[in-house]
Image: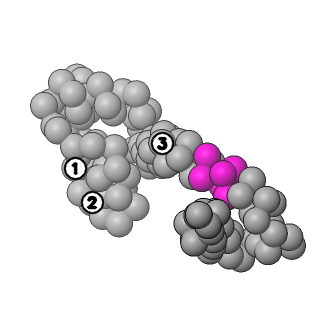
């Protein structure tokens, strides 16, 4: 009986890893062992950072809102408190976009928050 090695599956697995490592520097894109380690590391970072990205963007929106609020005489925390009291349901992402692209609408929202706080 002939010896069975399952070579096609092994080759396919190796090629799949090397395709994922395409564009990596040096031997990490050419040698299977180095490529496998680099791909595992890259996938680990990708998994982690898909979650971290959400936190980073939220903090970016908050920083932008605080910078946009200060010239209008209110801080970010007071703005959020006023919006909650006024019953305005708009998320930080959209508020940030308004502050950047439509200053008049953002000022109207800030005025509404100020009125709710007073």
The relative height of residue 84 versus residue 48 in the rendered view (above or below) is above
Q: Which residue is mark 3?
A: 51
Residue nearest the viewer, comparing 93 with 111:
93
Residue 96 falls left or right of residue 22: left
- Measure how far apart labels 2 and 3 are at the Cα level: 34 Å
> Is disc 2 in contact with disc 1, using a CB cutoff of under 8 Å?
yes
> Is disc 2 in contact with disc 3, using a CB cutoff of under 8 Å?
no
Residue nearest the viewer, comparing 36 with 80:
36
Residue found 22% across the figure and 49% down from its top: 108
Query: Which structural element holds mark 3?
Result: helix
Discs 2/3, front: 3
- Measure how far apart labels 3 and 1 are at the Cα level: 33 Å
Query: Which structural element holds mark 1?
Result: helix
Query: Which structural element holds mark 2?
Result: helix
Circle number at residue 104: 2
Q: Is residue 40 magenta?
A: yes
The dominant secondary structure in magenta is helix
Badge 3 crowding class, 10 Å Cα cut-off, few under 14, some 14 to 19, many 20 or more, is few
């Amino acid at each position: 009986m002939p010896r069975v090695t399952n070579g096609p599956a092994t080759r396919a697995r190796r090629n799949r890893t090397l395709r994922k490592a395409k564009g990596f520097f040096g031997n990490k894109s050419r040698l299977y062992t180095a490529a496998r380690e680099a791909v595992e590391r890259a996938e680990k970072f990708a998994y982690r950072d898909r979650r971290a990205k959400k936190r980073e963007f939220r903090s970016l929106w908050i920083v932008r809102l605080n910078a946009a609020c200060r010239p209008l005489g209110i801080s970010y925390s007071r703005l959020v408190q006023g919006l909650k009291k006024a019953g305005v349901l708009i998320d930080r992402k959209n508020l940030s976009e308004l502050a950047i692209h439509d200053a008049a609408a953002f000022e109207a929202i800030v005025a509404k928050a100020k009125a709710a706080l007073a």
